Image (cartoon, rainbow, N blue to C red):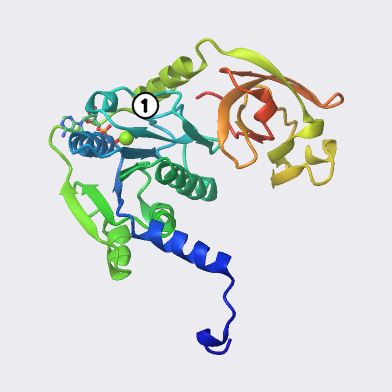
């Protein structure tokens, strides 16, 4: 490219540049909260949201914890805008924005988790959030924890990472982030934080699913018009070429019955999470139990890797 002054700039280029730069200048602080399991992340996030509401800021709450979900059922990343302090304590199991990641842990699903969190952040920003807090899973250990949190910080570009730790267990994540110029605030885990056993955590997930599926009905889908995401490779031949968005390794005697699925629109937004009740490969029909959903908007069925667990 030569000099900028040599270019002929169409007026729509100017309009677009102005629009982009104006929105870029709008101040909206984004905080991402990280810490191990039961470190008090969600409690601190709710506190921050309540404070933002007190200050009359519309707070975007992104719940990127796919296991111990505050918003939405487990296996999802969820978001909503909160304007009143009273709403902070009401955990919304059917929030306005959901992305389905297919399971209760980020392990094996890092891309879905990182991309889903970014889409949820975009949604709260587009919905007018003046402040954003991002809650995350307790997966922080080792290379996997580091990969997940640093990729998330890369894609979400938070203004601040709040790290809640007992001792130095987050330093393998925080040190590289700080070297990259990310602002980090360290908090000590509160003495009041309570550790929960695996069975208590499982009970929590089952209760969330029970609440989510309350009043659900069975919806019928024909696969002729739908894309299929995360389909096992040995099952892919049942579908038209080009219909499969992504495949999983070969799975023996695979059947989707009993698995969770995400019923997605064209953008990958999850309109509802469902549970497969029946599937017929010949007629390419699937019956899915799910809360009320406009089935006409469903463009893709994303197949989960687990049932309710
Ligand atoms: N500052 C605090 N005061 C009182 N209880 C707390 C506090 N921090 C955490 N807890 C309690 O400890 C438990 C774990 O906290 P939580 O915020 O859910 O952790 P995380 O989201 O990191 O898993 C919850 O029962 C919560 O109510
Ligand atoms: Mg939590």
Which quarter of the figure has residue 269? top right
Along the line of sight, the residue nearer the viewer: 18 or 144: 18
Residue drawn at x 39%, y 29% as measured from the top left: 71
- Tell whether 256 sits left or right of 130: right
Residue to which mark 1 is pinned:
201
- The residue drawn where x is 51% and y is 49% is 115
The answer to whether residue 249 shows anywhere in this view is no
For image coordinates 56% across by 87% down, the residue present is 6
Q: Residue at x 24, y 23 (%)?
A: 86
Judged from this view, the residue extending furthest toward the right is 282
Percent x, y for residue 113? 49, 45
Position of residue 36 measured from the top left corner of the image (x, y, whole percent): 30, 43
Q: Is residue 130 above or below residue 301?
A: below
Q: Choose between 142 and 109: the one closer to the eye.
A: 109
- Work out whether residue 25 or residue 309 is closer to the camera in this orientation and state it: 25
**Is any atom of residue 260 visible in this view?**
yes
- Identify whether 218 is placed above or below 173: above
Secondary element at image label 1: helix
Residue 290 image point, x, y percent? 59, 19
Which quadrant of the picture is home to ligand 1?
Answer: top left
Q: Is residue 42 left or right of residue 139?
A: left
């Amino acid at each position: 490219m030569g000099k900028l002054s040599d270019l002929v700039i169409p007026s729509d280029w100017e309009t677009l540049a102005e629009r982009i730069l104006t929105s870029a200048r709008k101040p909206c602080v984004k905080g991402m909260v990280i810490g191990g399991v039961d470190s008090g992340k969600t409690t601190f996030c709710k506190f921050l949201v309540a404070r933002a509401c007190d200050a009359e800021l519309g707070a975007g709450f992104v719940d990127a914890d796919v296991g111990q979900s505050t918003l939405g059922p487990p296996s999802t990343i969820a978001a909503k805008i909160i304007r009143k302090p009273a709403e902070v304590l009401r955990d919304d199991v059917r929030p306005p924005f959901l992305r389905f990641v297919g399971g209760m842990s980020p392990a094996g699903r890092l891309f879905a988790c990182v991309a889903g969190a970014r889409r949820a952040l975009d949604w709260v920003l587009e919905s007018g959030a003046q402040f954003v807090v991002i809650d995350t899973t307790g997966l922080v250990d080792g290379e996997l924890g580091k990969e997940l949190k640093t990729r998330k910080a890369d894609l979400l570009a938070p203004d601040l990472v709040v790290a809640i730790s007992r001792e130095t267990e987050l330093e393998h994540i925080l040190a590289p982030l700080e070297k990259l110029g990310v602002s980090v605030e360290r908090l000590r885990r509160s003495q009041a934080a309570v550790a929960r056993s695996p069975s208590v955590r499982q009970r929590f997930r089952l209760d969330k699913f029970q609440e989510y599926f309350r009043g659900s009905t069975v919806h019928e889908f024909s696969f002729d018009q739908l894309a299929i995401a995360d389909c096992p490779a040995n099952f892919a031949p049942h579908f038209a070429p080009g219909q499969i968005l992504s495949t999983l390794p070969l799975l023996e005697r695979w059947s989707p019955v009993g698995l969770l699925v995400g019923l997605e629109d064209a953008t990958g937004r999850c309109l509802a999470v469902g549970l497969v009740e029946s599937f017929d490969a010949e007629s390419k029909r699937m019956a899915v139990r799910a809360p009320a959903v406009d089935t006409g908007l469903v463009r893709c069925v994303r197949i989960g890797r687990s049932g309710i667990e």
